[in-house]
Amino acid sequence: DIVMTQSPDSLAVSLGERATINCKSSQSVLYSSNYQNYLAWYQQKPGQPPKLLISWASMRESGVPDRFSGSGSGTDFTLTIGSLQAEDVALYFCQQYYSPPWTFGQGTKVEIK
Amino acid sequence: QVQLQQSGLGLLKPSQTLSLTCAISGDSVSSTTAAWNWFRQSPSRGLEWLGRTYYRSTWSYDYAVSLKSRMTINPDTSKNQFSLHLNSVTPEDTAVYFCARGTGTFDIWGQGTVVSVSS
């Protein structure tokens, strides 16, 4: 199985400041035939299911604010919240869909400083 | 829009069978482009994919290796839903269980069901 490891486990950021979450996969999730990274990011608020934010490492889902951006390739990825808003307080997960079983990072908790 | 509504009992004793159902609206369990998945989430195991069913020309099923011997996922085309059955539960199966649509990424989720296994 591909192991996904996120860092940090939690971070506190001031409103309007940037939040950066890292995700590392135990093997590359870049598919050579189409040069796509099979990496997604989710946001989960308390008592709710995860919400898909980004797929293909950097493609925002419809309706996701543009302050959320994804980057990276191969084994190293980053989710950036460009200007943290109060409603962004949540748990964030990366997930690989390169090969089953689909696996998730342990999550990063984002709070307001 | 597509919605998934979960139902099922959340309090179990060890050795019992967990049964959950996910009712689909706005899409079809027989869709040839979708897949229907179960996940669980616990503090100790994090977010874990359990398995899926999908229809292309026949029904297919994939299960997490660690649970394959205890788990079945069944589509019900007459009710447009799918179910999870996990037998011989132990306290380690205590978690929030989710159903979700997706073939790699998961865009629609059920509301979650808290399942507690305790004697």
Image (cartoon, coloured by chain):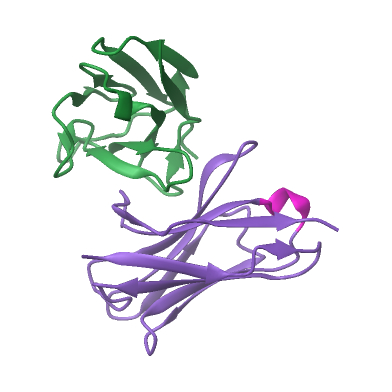
Chain colours: A green, B purple
What residue is at 52 percent from the left and 46 percent from the top?
B48
Image position of B13 with respect to A102: above or below: below
What residue is at 32 percent from the left and 51 percent from the top?
B106
Q: Nearer the viewer, residue B67 or A1?
A: B67
What residue is at 28 percent from the left and 75 percent from the top?
B56
Extreme residue in the bottom direction: B78
**Quadrant hosting residue B89:** bottom right
**Quadrant hosting residue B115:** bottom right
Residue B114 located left or right of residue A101: right
Residue B19: image location, x then y, percent: 61, 71
**Is residue A13 visible in the rendered structure shown here?**
yes
Residue B4: image location, x then y, percent: 37, 66
Residue B117: image location, x then y, percent: 75, 57
Residue B60: image location, x then y, percent: 40, 72
Residue A6 located left or right of residue A87: right
Residue A26 located left or right of residue B93: left
Was residue A79 drawn as part of the magenta stretch in this picture?
no
**Is residue A97 visible in the rendered structure shown here?**
no
Q: Nearer the viewer, residue B72 or B6?
A: B6
Magenta residues span: B90-94
Extreme residue in the right direction: B119
What residue is at 17 percent from the left and 36 percent from the top?
A60
Image position of B11 with respect to B74: above or below: above
Q: Quadrant of the C terminus of chain A?
A: top left
**Quadrant hosting residue A50:** top left
Image position of B19 with respect to B96: above or below: below
Image position of A17 with respect to A25: above or below: above
Chief secondary structure of the magenta portion: helix
